[in-house]
Amino acid sequence: MLKLKGGSSEFFVRKEEDLRLSSDALAVILRAVQDKGFSFKFPVKGFSMLPCIRTGDVVTISPLSASAIGLGKVVAFIHPETAKFNIHRIVGSWRNVYLIKGDNAIKFDGLIPIRNILGGVTSVERNGKRVFSGLGRARHPISLLSFLHVFWILLFIRKRISILLQINR
């Protein structure tokens, strides 16, 4: 159930059970709402953005200009290969293509074209209160840590494999 929040230029979904939309439907709604200059607020599910965003948190997705999209920004996007809706952080960029990854995810989402980015997360609420979510000044170091997280895991795996290979000789 979508409602216009009085006077604040914001659409929102009140309860998680109100939101039963496919990725395609959510993308269409987000684009339509943001074309009017509104933000869209809804509860999220998943663990890929822990600890910044948790299941049940209410996120606000706001329209972004191309100049506002950058390193560390948490964005809503549709993955070009899987057509899945995601909310993850930009950890790198090249021209109008962005390397995106969840803070708690091992794998990168890959290179996402700007046309697939639906908007930016501008607020995260937990139990009715706004929470720190790595959206402010902390977004740059968090994106670096998210990027390095994968690097260190791969390095750890490589080291373990080489140790196992040496033991088996």
Image (tube, helix red, strand yellow):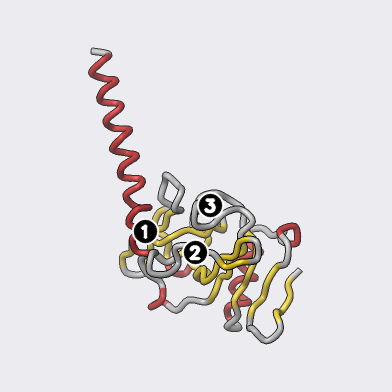
Which amino acid type is marked by label 2? Phe
Residue 65 rendering spot, x and y as whole percentages: 44, 79
Residue at horizontal 46%, vertical 64%? 74
Q: Quadrant of the N terminus?
A: bottom right
Q: How crowded is mark 2: few (under 14 residues within 10 Å), some or many (20 or more)?
A: some
Judging from the image, what secondary structure is the residue with disc 3 in?
loop
- Left or right: residue 144 versus residue 31 is left
Q: Mark 1 points at which residue?
A: 143
When asked about the image quadrant of residue 35, the answer is: bottom right
Nearer mark to the viewer, of 3 and 1: 1
Residue at horizontal 34%, vertical 53%? 145
Q: Mark 2 points at which residue?
A: 132
Q: Name the residue under label 3.
A: 82
> Is residue 110 depicted above or below 169 in this figure?
below
Distance (Cα) linking label 1 and label 2:
15 Å
Q: Earlier in the sequence, mark 1 or mark 2?
A: 2
Judging from the image, what secondary structure is the residue with disc 1 in?
helix
Residue 136 rendering spot, x and y as whole percentages: 42, 69
Which amino acid type is marked by label 3? Thr
